[in-house]
C-alpha cells in the first residue's frame, strides 16, 4: 500500500515542480509591480507567493527523497510545519487587508496587469478543482498538502483579482471597502482554517502511526514468544524421543 501511494505521489511531483516554477515567477512579477507602482499590496502578495513557493518546494523535496516507499514520519512533519506556517501567514495577510482598507485608496491598474492577474487566478482555480477531483480518494499526505497549498494560492488570487478589478472598473467607490472587507475576511479565515486542519491532521496521523508501530512491535513480540515456545516443544519432543530410543536399545542389548 505504501509503495503504491509513493508511486502515485511521484507521478504528481513533476506537476508540482512545474507549479513551483509558476509560483516563483508570479511572486517575482508581483514584487516588481509593487515596487514599480509603489503598491504595498503587490509587494505583500509577492512575499506571500514566495512563502507558498517555499512550502511547495519542501513538499517536492520530501517526495523526491522518499522514493517509491515514502517515510511517513518525515511527511507528517512537513504537514505539521506547513499547516502552522499557513495559519501564521493568514494572520499576516489579514493585517495587510486591514491596512489596505484603512488607506481607502483605490488605485486603477492597466489592462495587461488585470489580464495577468485574471489568467493566473483562473489557472489556479482550475488546478485546485482538478486535484480535488482526481485525488479525492487518495490519503497520501504529500498530495493532500499540495492540494492545501493550491487552495491557499487560489483564495489569495481571488482576493487580489477582486481588489484590483473593482478598483479599476467600479464607477462608485462606496461598495469597494465593504466588498474587500467581506472577501478579505473570508479568505483569511479560509486560509487559517486550512492551516489549522493541516497541522492537526499531521499531529493526529503521527499519533496513529506511533500507535500502529507500538501494536506492530507487540505483535512481533507475541509471534517471537510463540515461535520460541514451539521450538522448545519440538526440541523437548525430539530429545525425549531420542532418550527413549537410546534406553530401549540399551535394554535390548
Image: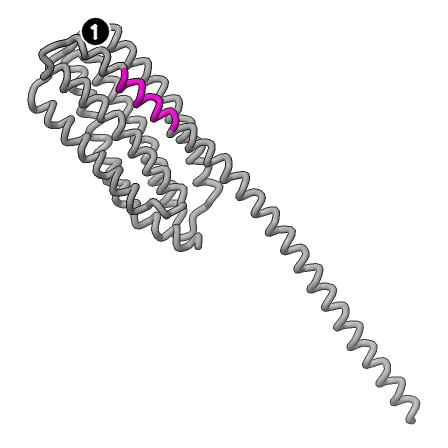
Above or below residue 158? Residue 239 is: below
- Residue displayed at 26% across by 6% down: 102
Judged from this view, the residue extending furthest toward the left is 111
The image shows residue 252 at horizontal and vertical percentages of 91, 93
Asked if the magenta segment contains residue 75, the reply would be: no
Which of 143/180 is in front?
A: 180
- The stretch of residues the image draws in magenta is 182-193
Above or below residue 52? Residue 5 is: below
Q: For residue 99, what is the image quadrant?
A: top left
Q: For residue 50, what is the image quadrant?
A: top left
- Residue displayed at 72% across by 68% down: 230
- Residue displayed at 84% across by 85% down: 245
Provide the residue designation for mark 1: 104
Above or below residue 224? Residue 161 is: above
Magenta stretch prevailing secondary structure: helix
Whether residue 230 sits left or right of residue 75 in the image: it is right
Judged from this view, the residue extending furthest toward the bottom is 253
The image shows residue 149 at horizontal and vertical percentages of 32, 33
Few, some or many C-alpha atoms within 10 Å of disc 1 (few <14, some 14-19, many ≥20)?
few
Looking at the rendered image, the quarter that the N terminus falls into is: bottom left
The image shows residue 155 at horizontal and vertical percentages of 27, 27
The image shows residue 93 at horizontal and vertical percentages of 31, 18
Amino acid at each position: 500500500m505504501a509503495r503504491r501511494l509513493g508511486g502515485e505521489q511521484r507521478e504528481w511531483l513533476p506537476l508540482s515542480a512545474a507549479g513551483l516554477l509558476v509560483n516563483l515567477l508570479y511572486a517575482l512579477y508581483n514584487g516588481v509591480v509593487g515596487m514599480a507602482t509603489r503598491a504595498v499590496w503587490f509587494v505583500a502578495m509577492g512575499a506571500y507567493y514566495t512563502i507558498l513557493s517555499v512550502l511547495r518546494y519542501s513538499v517536492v523535496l520530501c517526495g523526491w527523497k522518499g522514493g517509491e516507499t515514502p517515510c511517513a514520519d518525515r511527511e507528517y512533519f512537513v504537514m505539521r510545519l506547513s499547516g502552522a506556517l499557513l495559519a501564521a501567514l493568514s494572520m499576516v495577510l489579514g493585517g495587510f487587508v486591514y491596512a489596505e482598507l484603512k488607506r481607502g485608496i483605490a488605485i486603477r491598474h492597466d489592462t495587461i496587469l488585470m489580464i495577468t492577474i485574471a489568467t493566473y487566478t483562473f489557472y489556479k482555480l482550475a488546478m485546485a478543482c482538478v486535484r480535488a477531483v482526481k485525488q479525492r480518494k487518495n490519503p497520501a499526505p504529500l498530495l493532500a498538502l499540495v492540494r492545501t497549498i493550491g487552495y491557499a494560492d487560489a483564495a489569495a488570487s481571488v482576493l487580489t483579482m477582486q481588489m484590483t478589478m473593482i478598483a479599476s472598473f467600479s464607477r462608485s467607490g462606496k461598495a469597494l471597502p465593504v466588498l474587500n472587507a467581506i472577501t478579505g475576511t473570508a479568505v483569511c479565515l479560509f486560509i487559517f482554517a486550512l492551516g489549522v486542519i493541516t497541522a492537526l491532521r499531521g499531529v493526529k496521523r503521527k499519533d496513529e502511526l506511533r500507535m500502529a508501530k507500538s501494536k506492530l512491535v507487540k505483535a512481533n513480540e507475541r509471534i517471537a514468544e510463540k515461535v520460541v515456545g514451539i521450538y522448545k516443544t519440538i526440541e523437548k519432543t525430539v530429545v525425549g524421543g531420542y532418550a527413549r530410543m537410546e534406553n530401549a536399545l540399551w535394554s535390548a542389548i
